[in-house]
Image (cartoon, rainbow, N blue to C red):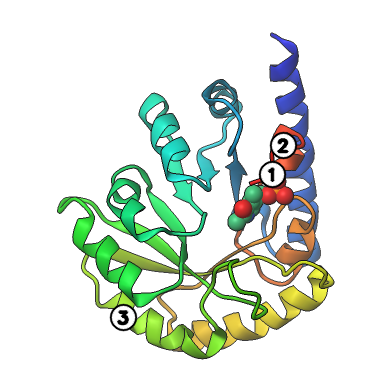
Amino acid sequence: MNNRHEELSRNVAIVRERIAHAALQSGRSPDEITLIAVTKTYPASDVATLIELGLIDFGENRDAEGSEKSQLLKARWHFQGQIQSNKIPSIANWANVVHSLDNPRHSDRLDRTIPSEKTMDVFLQVSLDDAPGRGGVSPDQLNQLAIATLEKPHLRLQGLMAVAPLGVEPARAFEQLAVIHNGFSTHFPQAPYLSSGMSGDFETAIIYGATHVRVGTSILGTRNHPL
Ligand SMILES: *Cc1c(COP(=O)(O)O)cnc(C)c1O
């Protein structure tokens, strides 16, 4: 057993403990929370170790990197980066879940490029501020995007995804998200999930209803180059 194995094992145990604590605090079972290990910038060998430690779900932000790792290792692969139109055919091939759908043209293109026997789980990314370039549809266009997505035969709408804006107290951002999510689940009860929360704020996200947390740094360590 090498040091990296021990380090990852310890980090996963701590993150699971923190998830369980936040879930119980919010009156839910820890089993209701899906932990996605965000392995961007880290090697496939780390993914292999995390699979040995019982993780199933892995998140990547870049098409090329996700495509490469997914060819080496069987897991449930989540794409959570900003979608570039020309990368959609590749993403359609390797990803099992897309968290960052934020525009009806992408929904259309994704549906058309998914291999016919396959379906793709999708979350709609909602913007909690109007900062350009970070992705996400504005809350007032959400229902329209959901309707367009539900019509697609290869897409299975799961719910919403969001990232807390920089410089905003996570609790405020996730409280705002909870209001949006409540409205959304009333309209679309078939898509009840909420993907929110990263290393710095996943407990707060869980308290405000997250069902999926995307955790990189707390499991794998600080990334050398930001992404
Ligand atoms: C990088 C990233 C994460 C993980 O961030 P950490 O702070 O390392 O846990 C989660 N979600 C998205 C969209 C990301 O880009």
Query: Of tags 2 and 3, which is closer to the observer?
Result: 2
Which tag, 2 or 3, sits closer to the chain's start? Answer: 3
Q: Quadrant of residue 204?
A: bottom right
| Image mark for residue 148 | 3
**Residue in the image at 72% along x and 65% along y:** 205
Q: Quick one: SS at disc 1? A: loop
Q: Quick one: SS at disc 2? A: loop
Image coordinates for residue 184, horizontal then vertical, percent: 51, 84
Q: What residue type is disc 3 on? A: Ala
Q: What residue type is disc 1 on? A: Pro
Q: Are marks 3 and 1 in contact (CB under 8 Å)?
A: no
Image coordinates for residue 100, horizontal then vertical, percent: 48, 63
Report how far apart the C-alphas of labels 3 and 1 lie in the structure.
33 Å
**Residue in the image at 52% along x and 91% along y:** 140
Report how far apart the C-alphas of labels 1 and 2 lie in the structure.
6 Å
Query: Of tags 3 and 1, which is closer to the observer?
Result: 1
Return the residue at label 1. Answer: 226
Image coordinates for residue 85, horizontal then vertical, percent: 35, 60
Query: Can I make out residue 193 in this image?
Result: yes
| Image mark for residue 138 | none
Return the residue at label 2. Answer: 223
Q: Quick one: SS at disc 3? A: helix
> Residue 198, relative to residue 108: is it above or below?
above
Q: In this view, which residue lies farthest toward the left?
A: 116
**Residue in the image at 43% along x and 82% along y:** 188
178 to the left or right of 56? right
Q: Nearer the viewer, residue 76 or 163?
A: 163
